Image (cartoon, rainbow, N blue to C red):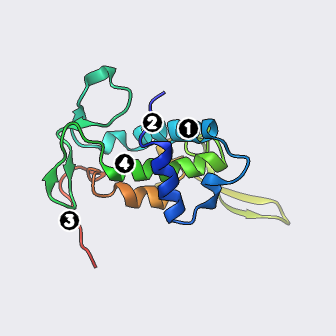
Amino acid sequence: MAHYGDLLGALAYHEARGNAAWSASGVNDPQRTAALVRASAALDGIYGGRFAGHKAGGRSQALAWPRSGAFDHCAGEDISNDEIPQEVINAAYELALAELQRPGSSSPTVTPGRLVKRQKVEGIEREFFGPGDGVSGSSDGMRPVLMAVEDALRCVLEPAGGGSVDLLRV
């Protein structure tokens, strides 16, 4: 199975950040590889529609990257059609850590429906809200968001509504 990055790169990434869970005793390379595979698939599923361009290798290419027509919004330059940006690899490493700790956490099974807005214990009063109340009922709106992944990908994603993006560095 295909995945972004490699085990040595993931180890260096997590060691630099003090993420001891990646190299904890009892965790083996097949588990780490499986976490990278799940994380890479989840990245493509969650963010693939916001990656500019198209797969460089066509439909037979297993993952969304490398891509033709991709753009780095932070650097203001095109991304080579044979490159997997480090941002994507780092995002895979971040999501793989979450997957290693809780397999399946990046693509949970959800049952769309009404969400509880208010609940009283005594008197048993419950109030629900859903799409009619301006809350998204889509499964994408129910996916967990790992901000480290969002941060890693921000330069290589197209804006959610299309158009251009202005990034301000502080």
**Spatial distance from mark 3 to mark 2, Cα to Cα?**
30 Å
Q: Which of 18 and 41 is in front in this view?
A: 18
What secondary structure is found at the residue carrying circle 3?
Answer: loop
Residue 84, x across and y down, in percent: 30, 42
**Spatial distance from mark 4 to mark 3, Cα to Cα?**
20 Å
Which is more N-terminal, label 2 or label 1?
2
The kind of residue tagged 2 is: His
Please identify the residue farthest to the left as the structure is shown.
77
Query: Residue under circle 1?
Result: 33
Q: Do the numbered discs 1 and 2 sit on residues whose CB atoms are within 8 Å? A: yes
Please state which of the two labelled residues, at mark 4 or mark 3, is closer to the viewer: 4
Q: Which of 13 and 151 is in front in this view?
A: 13
Task: Say which residue appears at 68% left-offset and 54% top-offset.
Answer: 24
Picture layout, residue 98 above or below residue 104: below
Q: In which quarter of the image is the C terminus?
A: bottom left
Picture layout, residue 156 above or below residue 112: below
Which is more N-terminal, label 3 or label 4?
4
Task: Say which residue appears at 52% left-offset and 52% top-offset.
Answer: 11
Query: Residue under circle 2?
Result: 3
Q: Which mark is residue 44?
A: none
Q: In this view, does 152 lie to the left or right of 82?
A: right
Residue 29, x across and y down, in percent: 61, 40
The kind of residue tagged 3 is: Asp
The kind of residue tagged 1 is: Thr
Query: Residue under circle 4?
Result: 88
